Amino acid sequence: MGGDVLPYVYQVTKYDPADRDQHGRYTGVEPATSDHGPVETAYLQAIVAFAEESGVEQLSVREPEIGGFAHFGLEPPIDGYGLADVFPAGLTGFHDGALVPMAAGLELVRAMLRDHGAWCRLEAEGAFTVHVGWDQYLYIGSSRPCEAALARTRSLGLFPERLHASPYDFAPDDPHHLQRPADADFWARLRWTVSSHRATFLEETYAGNASRWHRLTRDNIEAVRSQLAPRAQLAVWPDLLTGVDAAMDSLPEEGLVEILWEDEDGWITSMVVDETRFEAAASRITGARAAGVVSLATDERHPLFTAVLPDSDGVLRARRQTEPTPSDRDWAFLKTLRRGQVVTGTVTLIADFGVTFVDIGGFTAMINIPELSWHPINYPSDVVSVGQEITAEVLDVDMVRERVPLSLRALQEDPWPRIAQRIGRVVTGPVTRIVPFGVFVRVEDREDGFEGLVHNSELNESSEKGIEVGDALTVKIIGVDIARRRIALSQVQARTTLRQGGSGDGSV
């Protein structure tokens, strides 16, 4: 996920190293702003010299930024951020991974040297990098020593110095963070979420400090998806828009916020403002159909889940990361699970509707009653208790609903083949239930033992009207349906077997 680590990196500046104090601070007279003339041209010619010696003819735009923090502030930003005519498709072409010819790359560097408000890293993977820093500092990296380019740079009146690395090399916010891609699972979850009316907005950050908002419906998800910028960062939000007055009343006393508003045609516009521009923002959204406010503070932003668009081949090459939400962390954990895996967890809750919830590594999985035991139970508390540590098998990993059903019985021996071996045996057991079509008798000597059905047609005539729950009944096991988990019993055949001298299992 990091940038290229090249063996030859040079800091190229217009500042003479002799004009620095003992702390390395520049003490000369060169201004920190671009001269828009000979010095700027010298910088660009130095880049060309290094690129030619590196064998590079085109560059890739990485981590583009526009406006906001991308503007160093030495010169006022201009319309278009200095990128007019650089990209055939305008600013929509200024995206991560965009390949540009060297001429366009030089115009990007010019815009950065002039501090127009656009910034990016320029790279040719494994071969060449160009970074523009504060105060006209240029950093050029190459896979080759570029001795001729160094001589050319000195002849242009610039000062190249060898460094171990560029201070503008990309470094991920969290090297251990597993970034969620906007893959098939993401789009399936988004469709499910929209269908459940839990989300209506998609925030598309197509460059640093620049985003677009899309209202989502079941019918327009694919259309919105087809219009997203390559490698965009995506955030799925619940409905953010309320009345205009309510939105303005929710503004904080200070700090940066993003104000959204929707016009009568359904177009959503946004602007980032601080407390000094709240009044101006209020005048802009007058007449809007709805409006909302989103904080830019990380700990106050709460989208449902996020992702980054992979390239068309499905590979995630964007290096910027989204701030993980609880759902994103669940997704990362679910990626470590597989069906059939055995996990250990702690029972955290037994719900009134019978589902047992289990914490497995910070994720809450669930066990339905039938998966607690092969034997019939009435309540989960017959088998487990809150706080108990259990070991269970993963039945499925649902990446769309982000659910993991577990099973305790999957790790237990299936008793039904053993029950099937008892066909033909005569046993005596208690009547557990009486139903219109017969009675159920327990055929195992345990409180949760399996029950079989004695159909009315298999009851002795003398027993049909006098049987009560708890009565001991002698029956014969005449059939076991393993697939349907059913046991057929007969009182009539049990009496016949015993009369013929057959033996039974005895009382259960």
Image (cartoon, rainbow, N blue to C red):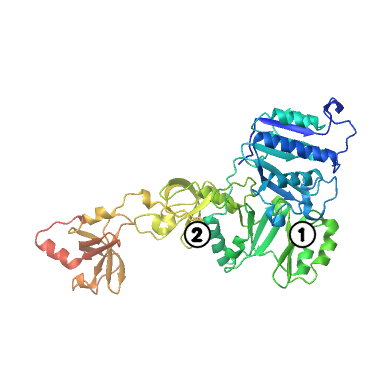
With 294 as the anchor, is 31 left or right in this view? right
Disc 1 marks a residue whose amino acid type is Met
**Residue 71 % position (x, y):** 79, 47
Question: Which one is in front in this view, the residue at disc 1 or the one at disc 2?
Answer: 1
Between residue 363 and residue 455, name the one nearer to us. 363
Along the line of sight, the residue nearer the viewer: 234 or 89: 89
The residue identified by callout 2 is: 351
Residue 46 position within the rendered picture, expressed as x and y whole percent measured from the top left: 75, 36
**Is any atom of residue 167 visible in this view?**
no
Check the image and name the residue furthest to the left: 500
Whichever of labels 1 and 2 marks the residue nearer the N terminus, that label is 1
Quadrant holding the C terminus: bottom left
Q: Is residue 465 left or right of residue 177?
A: left
Report, in whole angstroms, how far the alpha carbon at label 1 lies from the one at label 2.
Answer: 45 Å
Front residue (pair 400, 445): 400
Quadrant position of residue 478:
bottom left
| Position of the N terminus by quadrant | top right
User: Tag 2: Cα neighbours inside 10 Å, few (<14), some, or many (≥20)?
Assistant: few
Mark number, residue 75 = none
Image quarter for residue 235?
Answer: bottom right
Looking at the image, residue 215 lies above or below residue 23:
below
Q: Specify whether residue 364 is in view.
A: yes
Q: Which residue is mark 1?
A: 271
